[in-house]
Amino acid sequence: MKIRTWKRMVKQGFRNLFRNRIMSLASVSAIAAALFVLGLVLAVVMNMNNMVSGLESKVEVTVFLKENIRQADIDNLDRQINSWEGISERQFISRQEALNTWKEEWGDKRYLLDGYNEENNPLPDSFRITVEKPEFVEEIVEKAKKSSMVEKVQYSKDVVDSITNIASTARVFGLMIVGVLIAMAMVIIHNTIRISVYSRRREINIMKYIGATDWYIRWPFLMEGMLLGLIGAVVSGGLIGLVYSLLEKRMSSSPAQSNLLSLFQILPLNIILYPILALFIVVGGIVGISASLLSMRKHLRV
C-alpha cells in the first residue's frame, strides 16, 4: 500500500472518530474503565511480587565455627563461602563482636552480662550468610556442614518453607487474576467496538454496493478501532499514574511510614507506570484492530 494511501486511511480513521463523537467517547470510556481496573490489579500484583522478593532476599544462614580456629583457616572458609552459588552477602562476626551485639540487644539489662569478657566469652565466631532465594538454603547448609571448621549451622527451616510457599502462591494467584482481567478487558473492548461498527452498518453496505473492495472499506475502521484502543490506553494509563502518585505521597507523609517501610515499601511510580502503559497500548491497539475485523466481517457479506 502506498504511503499516500496510508495517510488517507489514517485521516479517515480520525475523521470517523470526530464524526461519531458520542459513540467514540462511549467506546474510549469503556476501554479506559476496563484497562484502569486491570492496571490497579497489576500495580497490586507488582508490589506484591516486590514484597515477596524482599522477603526471599532476607533469608539468612548462620554458620558457627569451632573454637581456636586460626585466622588463615577463617580466611580460607570465607573464600569457600564466597564461591558458593546463591549467596548475596556474607559477614564474618567475631566472638567479641557477637558479645557486644548481645549486650546492646539487652539494653537496660546489659549489666547482667558484665561477667562475660574476652576470656570467658561463651559465643563462637560465626559467618552470617544472606541467601538470594530460599531454594539455595538446603545446598548452602549441606556445604557448610561438610567443613571441618564448622561446629553448627543454624537457620529456620519453617520460615524458609513458609516464605517459599507464600512466594509461589502469591505469584500464581497474581498471574491468574491478571490473566482473567486481561481476558475481561479484551471482551469489553471487543464488544464496545462491535457496537460502534454496527451503528454504521449502512455506511459499510453502501460502500460495498458502489464497488469498494473489502480492504478499502476495512482500513478506515481498523484505524479507528486501533485509535480507540490507543486513546483508551493512554487515558487509563494517565489515571493509573495519578492515583498511584497520590497513594505514594499519602504513604510517604503517613506517620506510620517508618514502621510500614520495614515490612512493605511500594515501588516507585516509573517502575509501575511504564510496563502497565506498554501493556495497555498493546492490548488496546491489538484488540481494537481485531474487534473491528471481526465486527465488520458479516457486514461485508453483501
Image (tube, rainbow, N blue to C red):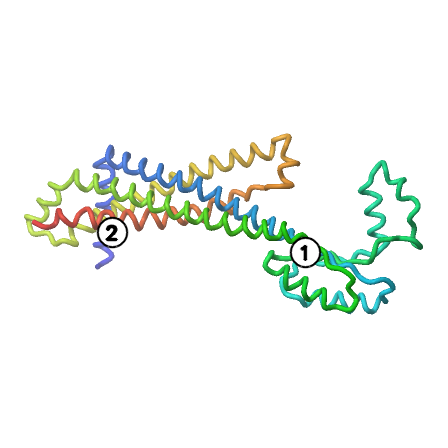
Q: Where is residue 118 in the image (x, y as percent from the top left)?
A: 92, 53
Q: Please give the label number shown on residue 7.
A: 2
Which one is in front, 222 or 4?
222
| Image: 63 above or below 221 | below
Q: From the viewer's perspective, is residue 83 above or below residue 130?
A: below
Q: Is residue 253 left or right of residue 292?
A: right
Residue 144, image x and y in percent?
Answer: 71, 64
10 Å crowding of disc 2: few (<14), some (14-19), many (20+): few
Q: In which quarter of the image is residue 6?
A: bottom left
Q: Which residue is drawn at 70% across and 57% down?
A: 129
Left or right: 285 as drawn, with respect to 5:
right
Q: What element carries label 2?
A: helix
Kind of residue sitting beneath label 2: Lys
Provide residue 243's location: percent of width, then percent of height.
47, 35
- Name the amino acid type tagged 1: Thr
Q: Which residue is drawn at 52% across and 48% down?
A: 49
Q: Mark 1 points at which residue?
A: 130
Which numbered disc flags the more N-terminal residue, 1 or 2? 2
Q: Residue at x 10, y 47 (%)?
A: 207
Q: Which of 32 and 105 is in front in this view?
A: 105
